[in-house]
Amino acid sequence: MNIRLKADKEHKRQYKKLLSSEWSADTVKDSFLLTDDFLNSGGIPVSYSKKTAATDWKTDILPYRSLMSLQINDEHFPVIPEKIPQRKSVSKIYRRNLVSEAVYNLTFPLSVKIGEFKNQPVKLEGDTDFLKDLKSLIILLASNYIIPELTKERMKEERDFIISILFLNTLITWHDNPAHQNYLLSVLFDKLGWSDLYRLYLHNAFKLTPPEEHDYLTKAQAYWSALIDENMFTEAEDFALKLLKNSKEEHFEEIKEIVSLTFHLQKN
């Protein structure tokens, strides 16, 4: 079954607005509504619905489990749980549903449930790049809002589940854009408190970004800040000096400030 997706001007306007919004419950809700509307733009109702809350994740995400075992060999990294427990409190049910909808959208079209089309393969056409943009937005929201909420509620299974999906989905969806792929992974590991991996992926994202890109200096500043936060002043100094040497002239004054601040912080 072929589905031709169409992103209109309103979709793109809403996306830009949400991308610059605070990471909050309202932003999550609006992002899911935007994704629903976009997924239905092909004329077939394939967006998330309440029925998917009863999805047998163990069966439907089995391909992801297999891929995960190939990608990760670390006993400390969360894996997709065998079973998601039934929740009773209103707050936990709400957060479980956030996970459900986020995972549905991230694994689309694998997650499609469309009546008689349930077992038919789905081929996406049209504005598939916009779908990737929406998935990127959901990854940022999940990392910055949903995972902290699950941690607060001690919902380990849901937390492990969505962390696994975020990691593997980033590898798959953004395989053709390694700079953004590494940036998204840095955000995830930052929120998990894995500072070494955060710096590694953030540095990778910077190295893979050409100096002429609009976010080149932003990524450089983020990596420099990560080094400073860990009191890695020698590494921060080396990075800042190399940055000054290799960057474009238009960035020169800003980078000089970074170098100067590095020396100042190192003395104090």
Image (cartoon, grey):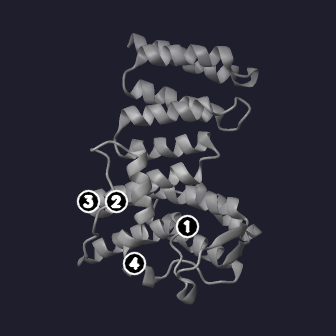
- Residue 202: x percent and y percent? 51, 35
Q: Tag 2 or tag 1, which sits nearer the N-term? A: 1
Q: Tag 4 or tag 3, which sits nearer the N-term? A: 4
Q: Which quadrant does the N terminus fall into?
A: bottom right
What separation in Å lies between label 3 and label 4 (alpha carbons)?
19 Å
Q: Is mark 3 on a helix, strand or loop?
A: helix
Which one is closest to the eye, mark 2 or mark 3?
2
Q: In the rendered image, which residue does mark 3 sit on?
A: 156
Which amino acid type is shown beneath numbered disc 3? Answer: Lys
Q: Do the residues labelled 2 and 4 touch (CB within 8 Å)?
A: no
- Residue 184: x percent and y percent? 52, 46
What separation in Å lies between label 3 and label 1 (alpha carbons)?
24 Å
Q: Tag 1 or tag 3, which sits nearer the N-term? A: 1
Q: Is mark 4 on a helix, strand or loop?
A: loop
- Residue 88: x percent and y percent? 23, 78
The numbered disc on residue 80 is: 2
What separation in Å lies between label 2 and label 4 (alpha carbons)?
14 Å
Q: Look at the picture and state if 169 lies above or below 111.
A: above
Look at 60% across and 29% down and name the residue there.
207
Side (left or right) of 93 relative to 133? left
Q: Is residue 84 or residue 145 the one in the foreground?
A: 84
Which quadrant of the view contains residue 59? bottom left
Which quadrant of the view contains residue 257? top right
Look at 69% across and 75% down and name the residue there.
3
- Residue 47: x percent and y percent? 56, 78
Q: Are marks 3 and 4 in contact (CB under 8 Å)?
A: no
Residue at the far bottom in the pictured view: 116
Q: Is residue 194 or residue 263 the one in the foreground?
A: 194
